[in-house]
Image (cartoon, rainbow, N blue to C red):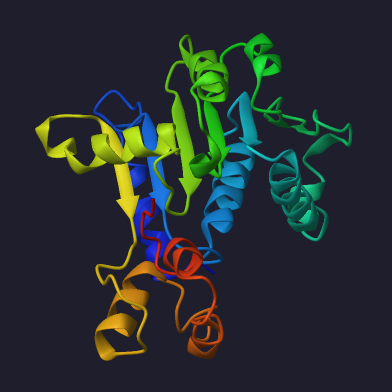
Amino acid sequence: DLMPWQKFVFEHALKVKPDGRWHAPLVVVVAARQNGKSTIMEMSILARLFLWQESLQLGSAHVLTTSLETFRHGVSIIENNPALAKQVKKIRWAHGSEEIELMSGARYVVKAANAAARGFAKPETVYMDETRQLKDTEAWSAMRYTMMAAKSPQLWTLSNAGDQHSIVLNQLRERGMSAAKGDDIAYYEWSSNYEKIDDSPAFWKGAAMANPALGHTIHIDNIRAVLNDPPDVVKTEVLCRWVA
């Protein structure tokens, strides 16, 4: 079951133009750690495989093990659902080239975010996790421009807050903040508007803004337990605030 904030993202990010193409070819989701961003990605992957039968999806992250965890969880969902499992042609476990292929021809492939991704033709959907870790545009370019010939491409990027070195995420955030000027980016950020870490009502109001899973999958005591960790870490990981 999806949480309200996840439903909100899907309902708005998956709007289409009159010709059926995605209204937003670029989707950015920013929220604090462990709030369910990976679940959004898993649900999207499965929907595009089994419901919409997209020919090719690519998944990547700054650290390949992050993409592999999403892949493993998706495979587990498939294997525990007979209606889905019977549609699978093959599941390939090859480090850095994991793949799910269905009888319909729909595929999801895990790829390292580097030059190796350039060899893939026309993926309909690309996922880039942990965008805050991209300190230059090399990996971004390798994945982003594989989609130029796709009929209706959509790139999803997910992250928590970054710092001054998060070049790609910072540019996306700037675009998102000014999207009312006509940019076709779909930018969704959950973050605290409170600067201090002081266990005050204002702090907890901000923490709730940054953690839309609070009360669903995150218990308030789990946040309270880390309040004495290094402040910049708490601000980044828990409050989803940009730090220097």
* Residue 188: % across, % down: 32, 51
From the viewer's perspective, is residue 46 above or below residue 154? below
* Residue 102: % across, % down: 75, 33
Q: Report whether 193 appears left or right of 143.
A: left
Q: Quadrant of residue 226?
A: bottom right
Q: Quadrant of residue 139?
A: top right
Question: Closer to the camera, 220 or 17?
Answer: 220
Kindly identify the residue that appears in the image at 35 percent across and 31 percent down.
22
* Residue 45: % across, % down: 60, 42
From the viewer's perspective, is residue 50 above or below residue 192? above
Image quarter hosting the N terminus: bottom right
Q: Report whether 81 appears left or right of 244.
A: right
Q: Quadrant of residue 58?
A: top right
* Residue 4: % across, % down: 39, 69
Kindly identify the residue that appears in the image at 50 percent across and 64 percent down.
233
Kindly identify the residue that appears in the image at 43 percent across and 48 percent down.
162
Kindly identify the residue that appears in the image at 66 percent across and 21 percent down.
114
Q: Report whether 89 appears left or right of 173.
A: right
How many numbered dots are placed on residues in this image? 0
From the viewer's perspective, is residue 85 above or below residue 36? above
Question: Closer to the camera, 193 or 59?
Answer: 193
From the viewer's perspective, is residue 104 above or below residue 194? above
